[in-house]
Image (cartoon, rainbow, N blue to C red):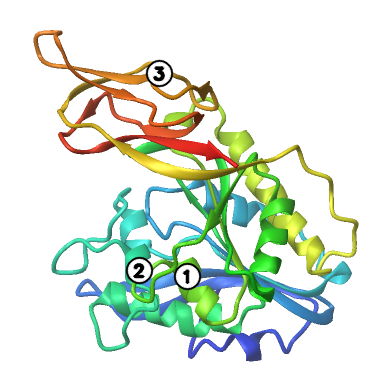
Amino acid sequence: MSEFKNFDLEKEIETRGRKIHGFVNIAAKPDGSYVKLPVLMAIGKEDGPIVLADGCNHGDEHEGAEAIISAYHALDVDRMKGTFVGVPVINMEAFNNLSRYGTSDFVPVDMNRIFPGNDKGTISQYVAHFYAENFVRKANALITIHGGGNYLYLEPITLYQDNNDEISKKSAEMAKVFGFKYLWKNKDYSEDSGFLDEVSYRLGVPSITPEIGGQTTRNGSREKNISDTRDGIMNVLRVFEIIDEPVKPVQQQINVEVDYLFIKEGGFNKPQKRPGERVKKGECLAIITNLFGEEIDRLEAPYDGVIVGYWAYSVCQPRSWICMLGKVE
């Protein structure tokens, strides 16, 4: 393991045909340890594109981190043309606390709402700035992986850029070969959303956001979720010809537009449909009961669709979303 001082991605990949991993120290903490980024680089024997993959932008979303580590160890640099850069955990402070948010800021900050960051801001803003400038800007493609974390469950779905240009076309190609069952177009871009994939687009870097699983799957499909995510990473590397192999075929995919559906009253959340289940407009998706077992609210499907995600806890708060419904295109 190395400690990267004055990290410069372009200089690191000048020495070809090697694997190297270690920490980039960002800033010292009061106890003498560092806010840092773990980095894994598989640098091919021959020059070529740079594909960047990251996980744990939210610290409780672990599938991406484990998949990145697995992909790194599976790669053979002697057969690569280009570089795979993996940052399994962007938000180390949140990761250490098993939380979506870090705790080093004065108030909790959602890191995936503050990109491209600020080099004069709080520590989370600075980490976001450092990552955008030193990693994303220098990559030819970005795979930024999310999951359900502590709060929700997600069917395998990949968000991709859709702005009718060359960057978007490459993003769509990446999303398709990644192989997740559901494809989700990102059409509503905002200059100040803070989302990493949208900042990547403005930097001219095609990106995708695969999302999968959550802590509800830890005893069930955890290993499959990790291996499917790793296989998706490897297939994107084949698209960019970093791995000299044919792109592997993927399952039939479904294009959806996703809405978060909100409930009015808080209480015990009793889902009436399963993930991946098709529903008709007006069907009951969930029933909310109070502490006396009485029904106080119910959620009905606003259109025909498919359940792609749901609130993981058995209790929900008032005016909170509890279901993600995909409208099939």
Q: Residue at x 53, y 23 (%)?
A: 277
Identify whether 320 is placed above or below 18: above
Label 1 is placed on what type of residue? Glu
- Residue neighbourhood size for the residue with mark 1, other residues' Cα within 10 Å, grouped as few (<14), some (14–19), many (≥20): many
Asked if residue 150 shows in the view, the reply is no
Q: Quadrant of residue 25?
A: bottom left
Distance from disc 1 to disc 3, alpha carbons, whole Å, reads 34 Å
Element under label 2?
loop
Estimate the x, y position of residue 109 in percent, counting from the top left: 24, 63
Task: Tell me if residue 248 can be seen.
Answer: yes
Q: Which sits earlier in the primary sequence, circle 2 or circle 1?
A: 2
Which residue is the site of mark 2? 193
Q: Counting residues from the N terminus, which is met first, the one under dot 1 or under dot 3? A: 1
- Which residue in the protein does label 1 denote? 198
**Residue to which mark 3 is pinned:** 283
Please state which of residues 282 and 259 is positioned toward the viewer in this rendering. 282
Mark 3 belongs to which amino acid? Answer: Glu
Q: Nearer the viewer, residue 134 or 252?
A: 252
Would you place residue 88 above or below residue 150 in this image? below
The residue depicted at 34 percent of the width and 79 percent of the height is 117
Q: Are marks 2 and 1 in contact (CB under 8 Å)?
A: yes
How dense is the environment of label 3, judged by Cα within 10 Å: few (below 14), some, or many (20 and up)? some
Which quarter of the figure is the C terminus placed in?
A: top right
Which amino acid type corresponds to the residue marked 2 in the rendered image?
Ser
Residue 174 shown left or right of residue 199 in the figure: right
